[in-house]
Image: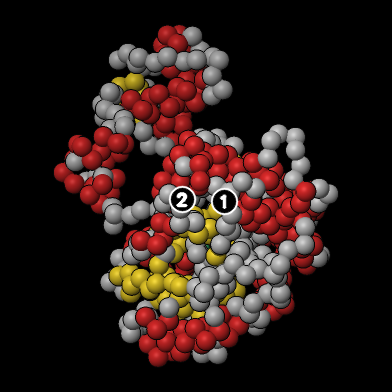
Amino acid sequence: MTLLMKLSRRDDVGLQHQVFEQIRSMILDGTVKCGAKLPATRLLSETLGVSRNTISLAYARLADEGYIEMRESVGTFVSSQIPDLALLPANASDVSAHALDGHFTILGSASIAAEVRSQTLINPHQRPLCADFWVGRPAAKSFPLKTWSKLIHRRLLSAGGALTEYKDPAGLLDLRKAIIEHLRAWRGITAHEDQIIIVGGCQDGLNLVCRMMMVRDGSAIVETPCYQGAAYLFESFGARLHPVPVDAKGLVTSMLPDVANSIAYVTPSHQYPLGVTLTLDRRIELLAWAARTHSYILEDDYDSDFRFSGPPITALKGLDRAGRVIYLGTFSKCIGAGIRVGYVVIPRGLEDSARHFKTLMNNGQPWLEQAALADFMKDGFYESHLRRIRRLYLNRRNALLDSLKRHFGSNEVLGAEAGMHLVWRIPKHLPSAHEIEKIALSVGVGVYTVSSGGAADLCPAAENDRLLVLGFSSLSEREIELGISRLAQALAKINPLAITRGPGHLPKGEIHPRSKGEPPHKQKRPLDRRMLA
Ligand SMILES: Cc1ncc(COP(=O)(O)O)c(C=O)c1O
């Protein structure tokens, strides 16, 4: 038989591999039938203009993998043992259309366990913007590149078997110990190293907890609005969601449903997305509710390293006497989402189950990042890094507050005392959040409504359309001013009364008296009183 093959000498892939791949594909897509005789190696080598050895080696590999059989003094044949299931159509997307008597339903949409949605993590506009107030992005230049590469290099040199062996699925002990120290000093949490499981960020931690605890038709209590990644994950596990509203004091605990054995997902330090902090009386109520209903609280502490005034607030986990709080921490915001490292603090009594589930999920996280991070924390780099970026984000937050005040006359905001974003309450005379988002986009500025900014607004309240979510951490002070002034100009075209005549509107070159010397956001300012009652 003749085989229609075309080899490329310019290809990065070797000739022998090309011969192997092309014959294998012809067998799998049925072009060459089971039992068919293949050309002799000499003939095929002459036809293709390659050495006979190339063909012999390709045939030998096909035989090793069971695609062909070489019968001495008779010839080479396509194996008659290849099961039908291996004869896949060339394009896997055709599978569901062909339906093949149900054999392939695992690849077709009918077999997907549940219709799922997933969280938006990057700016949904997919085009460059001159100022993008997208939420939760660390400043790109803040990554401690020099130190990190030194630590990685040092660990690589002394890695020994660490890169080839399986390790404790709960994570590197050095890192777990460093995290315990950090949690004790900064979050008021006391934990034993067995209670820490290193995961690939909060999202992975949420998955671990769901695998451990979520039963079909189980209940998940969520703040509304809340982080999409949590709400959609619970949905994907078939959970019934019970949204509980949030006000200026955080989750309205008096509205917690009396659902037994449930999970309550909360962001008490800096509610996502509204930014409010859960008050102490409500924290205590929430803990009492969990004890009463035999439920667990999932505390997502995603950005609490950035508290701009006063000492860090004790985490909810720090108040947990009954072992009802599962704490999720991440390095995505304070170092970078690209390293994909986070951790879960498991209540006493559940450590072994957590370890088993983690093993089932992925046998543990990559060693190198864990090792570098452990050194980064132990050697004091983490503390100084946090101090540095806290200052940087504070300046950016102040720049944003000043720009809002100057251009719109109002910087009434929520959640400005911590984190990487704040929520601006749009003054009454301006259009709705949805309209402003569109207008901003038309002038190359990204601002976000509650639901377009990565939150699941499960019971959209009309007043949410008077709120804009503005991330400031990844923008320079100049970009912040540029973005807000552009937005103000665009809105002024629609309604000239929409904006104030502050220093942002002075003729080019003229300096406002307040702006002489220090930039406005660096001048002395009264204490924050912008939190809403
Ligand atoms: C509230 C909240 N939790 C968790 C995450 C995701 O964190 P990680 O990167 O650790 O999965 C985000 C991401 O923006 C978030 O906003």
Is 190 drawn above or below residue 71 in the view shown?
A: below
Q: For mark 1, what is the residue?
A: 408
What residue is at 60 percent from the left and 83 percent from the top? 318
Q: Is residue 340 left or right of residue 73?
A: right
Q: From the top left corner, tell me how far across and down residue 413 is, in percent.
A: 56, 62
| Numbered disc 1: secondary structure | helix
On the image, which quarter does residue 368 sit in? bottom right
Res. 290 in view: yes
Q: Count neighbours of disc 1 (C-alpha within 10 A) and say few if under 14, some if 14 to 19, many if 20 or more.
A: many
Q: Nearer the viewer, residue 499 or 290?
A: 499
| Numbered disc 2: secondary structure | loop
Q: From the top left corner, tell me how far across and down residue 90 is, in percent.
A: 31, 30
> Which amino acid is tagged 1?
Phe
Q: For mark 2, what is the residue?
A: 430
Is 242 drawn above or below residue 129 in the view shown?
A: below
Q: From the top left corner, tell me how far across and down residue 188 is, in percent.
A: 66, 81
Residue 328 is marked as: none
Q: Are marks 1 and 2 in contact (CB under 8 Å)?
A: yes
Q: From the top left corner, tell me how far across and down residue 304 is, in percent.
A: 62, 68
> Which amino acid is tagged 2?
Leu
Q: Is residue 361 left or right of residue 38?
A: right
Question: Distance between the Cα atoms at labels 1 and 2?
Answer: 9 Å
On the image, which quarter does residue 177 sit in? bottom right
Q: Nearer the viewer, residue 368 or 117?
A: 117
N-terminal-most mark, 1 or 2: 1
